[in-house]
Amino acid sequence: MRLILQWLAVLVLLWPAEALGAVRIDFHSRDYDRRFPHAFVVLTGTVDATGEAVDASYGFTPIGQISPAILAGPAEGHVNPITAADIAKANLHFSIVLTDEEYARVMARVAEWKALPQPSYRLRERNCITFVADIAAVLGLDAAMVKGLEWKPHGFLDSVRDRNARAILARGGEVFAVSRGARRAVTAQASPVVASDSATR
């Protein structure tokens, strides 16, 4: 009996980490085009405690057709999913593997954004960038807005990545050096990432 228990203990230690339940959150930006949002998060994986499969994406955007009216004042906004095609073309800046408690916090914050009184979208104050910043802050990251990046989703997420690279890697996450049309993972030895042209995107 003791031998069986010892073998079971060894199997548990050797079992791949991927087999355990975990949800991963990816922080993306999209280069500017006519479709909103230009910054969003993607969650995939399995909730450890319940076995619930997770495959979702969230971004904050105005409702309906985008028009110059959003420049003049608030508009109705909503949290909406991102198409697979837009995710495939987006820039992945960093990823974090969430605990169940962190996943619950993220979903609670998404629910708060969904419940905002209308009109909830304000181009200069409450937009797709402030949405992903809020999600990052819920996870304990430094996601304070940087002057000059308020309307630059690519540059802003580069900035969040750079400020938090070591902490993200320490939590088993990944950070990516993103350039136009290319992406590469950055190792712990190479962090923090230096994105020399972040402020221009």
Image: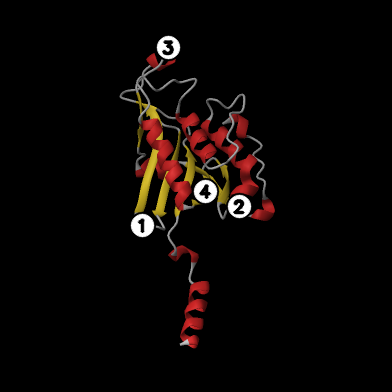
Tell me: residue 26, above or below residue 46. Answer: above
x, y percentage for residue 128? 45, 30
Q: Percent from the top left, x then y, of residue 158?
A: 58, 38
Quickly name the residue at label 1. 50
| Callout 3 amino acid | Ala
Q: Position of residue 93 (x, y in %)?
A: 54, 43
Binning the other alpha carbons within 10 Å of mark 1 as few (below 14), some (14 to 19) or many (20 upward) gives few
Q: Secondary structure at mark 1?
A: loop
Determine the residue positioned at 32% across, 23% down: 65
Label 1 or label 2, whichever comes before in sequence order: 1
Secondary element at image label 2: helix
Where residue 72 is drawn, which disc sits there?
3
Q: Nearer the viewer, residue 165 or 13?
A: 13
| Residue on which the image places disc 2 | 169
Q: Nearer the viewer, mark 1 or mark 2?
A: 1
Mark 3: which secondary structure? Answer: helix
- Residue 142 appears at what percent x and percent y? 60, 37
**Residue drawn at (35%, 38%) of the image:** 81
